[in-house]
Amino acid sequence: MLPYGKQTIDQADIDAVVEILKSDWLTTGPAVDRFEKEFAQTVGSQHAVTFSSGTAALHAAVQAAGIQPGDEVIVPAITFVATANSVLYCGGIPVFADVNPLTGLMDADDVESKITEHTRAIITMDYAGQPCDYDRIHEIADGRGLMVIADACHSLGATYKESSVGSLTDFSCFSLHPVKPITTGEGGMVTTDCERWAQLLRQFRNHGITSDYRQRNQEGTHAYNMSQLGFNYRMTDLQAALGISQLKKLGQFTAQRQVLADTYRVGLENIENASPLFQYENRTHSNHLMVVQIDQEKSGVSRNEVFNCLREKGIGVNVHYIPVYQHSYYKTRLGNMDHACPKAEKFYDSILTLPLFPTMKFENVEFVLEQIRVATNSGTARPSVSHLAA
Ligand SMILES: *Cc1c(COP(=O)(O)O)cnc(C)c1O
């Protein structure tokens, strides 16, 4: 099965991890510090704080943003459940905003219409790897004193008007899961420009304790204080060393993804019943996901039928994502919200994620395109992309 995404690991990555295994620090050591410094430099933020997962990173950011029980936080309807769950972890109420049906990105006008006196923050999500409309989001948030947290789990390596994702909001949260732009196995990161918030994030990942083991060692003291209720959300040095090694290749991975995504887009021009998402000119894309929309009316087949056809051919297509409020837990917790975000629901019915990862072969892209053409009844012109392969 051709997967929709997968990691790229080379000998340098393996060597970096083995070196840590032979060192004194398997966790809370110098590799974590170094990874944080290099990550912050890469995205142009003042601080970066590692976590055990992207979900833990989101939880910590929502906590550090001061979200309290009863506070409302606006999140996109189309996202991974962890975006909205992070609000629930803090006792907050996720309020779902509809998405642009051509991009899957949160619709800023709908965000504005959902603001109440209880709204405290907006969590954006850069769907598929394309940054959302940060100017509009800031316009809405800044005048009202709302925090902006970016769920940037898709968009490491992308830019908005020349600024890197990770430097655009109060907090930016990244996942380092194997399918994401770079990986540490499991892992996460929060970037921020505020020293005090960075400190809160560091404490939160370490039980809410104000110093870590290495600091106490250096200061020759056993005493520590727990000042808030935190978690063990720490990243190991094994993971951090892998992260440092992967980060060196972020530019290369992004470029490889871009060429493959361009190849898909050129091929899709000849497939009338399937189209790629709309892309804005003032931002670059990380191409984390290659999403196409199936035109059910013209093709006469549903997304699910196309999904099944491609799976039968060994193509590991996927669907990102069902509107969060349609999960049974959310229905029980927040009530039935059917039709709350009609564009998101329609978008969900149309989308299919195609395989895309840095080491994918051009022949594989061509094969996927040909199978989509057949499955969507899109005429007979064979989508030719071979001239791009050179
Ligand atoms: C992957 C992902 C997460 C969660 O990250 P984990 O590292 O798997 O916990 C959160 N939000 C989005 C949009 C993601 O894609």
Image: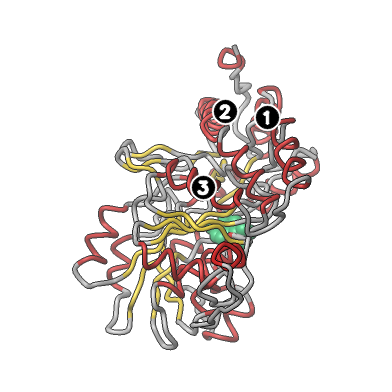
Q: Amino acid at mark 1?
A: Thr
Q: Earlier in the sequence, mark 1 or mark 2?
A: 2
Q: Say what secondary structure mark 1 lies in.
A: loop
For label 1, the residue is 359
For label 2, the residue is 256
In the image, is 281 to the left or to the right of 368? left
Q: Earlier in the sequence, mark 3 or mark 2?
A: 3
Residue 215 spot, x, y in % from top left: 55, 64
Identify the image quadrant of the N terminus: top right
Closer to viewer: mark 3 or mark 1: 1
Q: Amino acid at mark 3?
A: Ala
Q: Give yes or no for contact between labels 3 and 2 (Cβ–Cβ under 8 Å).
A: no
Q: Is residue 348 visible?
A: no
Closer to viewer: mark 3 or mark 2: 2
Q: CA distance from mark 3 to mark 1?
A: 18 Å
Q: Earlier in the sequence, mark 3 or mark 1?
A: 3
In the image, is 22 to the left or to the right of 275? right
Q: Residue visible at 49% across and 83% down? A: 227
Q: Say what secondary structure mark 3 lies in.
A: helix
Name which quarter of the figure residue 70 lies in.
Answer: bottom left
Q: Nearer the viewer, residue 159 or 364?
A: 159
For label 3, the residue is 128
Q: Residue visible at 66% across and 23% down? A: 362
Q: Nearer the viewer, residue 62 or 386?
A: 62
Q: Give yes or no for contact between labels 3 and 1 (Cβ–Cβ under 8 Å).
A: no
